[in-house]
Amino acid sequence: MTGLRTLRAGASLRAWGVLLLVMFVLTSAVGDSLALESSYLLVTLVSHIGLALVTAGLSGYVSGVVSRPYRSPGRGSARLAALCAGIATVAGAVFLFFGGSDPALYAMVGFALLGMIASVLMIVFGGPSGRAAAPS
């Protein structure tokens, strides 16, 4: 519980980047296990959908709220992560509801990978915020 309290109490963009990277990796790992199953287990499918929605929601929050005081590279990487999470989630819905098309699968996987890269960029550029880093 202390970790969540720290994130809510104004943790750096780096901490949020680590959390988003973990979420992208977990979502992808569960998705990979879905691909290995001959018929989708309901618990695996629901877990994958839940993780994807939480990842999209968290990345949207980070992009819209947390990244505001940061300079352009930090804000840009947060926005890229949110965009990737959103597109990957929509591609996953298309894959699920419209017959498992290959383009939707490739979009889902590609944007998840790009989201992981954006999360790493958040870690790299997420030092002190622009307000905290500005000389007084």
Image: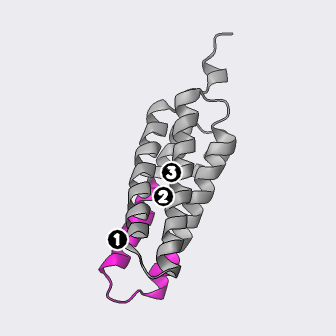
Residue sitting at the far top: 136
Principal secondary structure, stretch drawn in magenta: helix
At mark 1, the secondary structure is: helix
Q: Does label 1 or label 2 sit earlier along the sequence?
A: 2
Query: To which residue does mark 3 refer?
Result: 19
Q: Position of residue 115 (x, y in %)?
A: 45, 50
The numbered disc on residue 72 is none
Q: Is residue 45 magenta?
A: yes
Cβ atoms under marks 1 and 2 closer than 8 Å: no
Instruction: Work out how far the residue at label 3 is from the one at label 1, CA to CA, in angstroms.
Output: 20 Å
Q: Residues within 10 Å of mark 1 (few under 14, many from 20)?
A: few
Q: Position of residue 3 (x, y in %)?
A: 57, 50
Q: Amino acid at mark 1?
A: Asp
**122 lies left or right of 67:** left
Q: Quadrant of residue 117?
A: top left
| Chain part drawn in magenta | 22-47
Is there CB contact under 8 Å for labels 3 and 1? no
Residue pointed to by mark 2: 23
Seen in the image, is 53 located left or right of residue 98?
right
Disc 2 residue type (three-letter): Met
Q: Residues within 10 Å of mark 3 (few under 14, many from 20)?
A: some
Q: Nearer the viewer, mark 3 or mark 1?
A: 1
Residue 43 colored magenta? yes
Colouring mode (rainbow / by chain / secondary structure / one colour): one colour
In the image, residue 104 above or below residue 74: below
Numbered badge on residue 32: 1
Look at the numbered disc 2 and give the secondary structure of its residue: helix
For the residues bearing labels 3 and 2, Cβ distance under 8 angstroms: yes
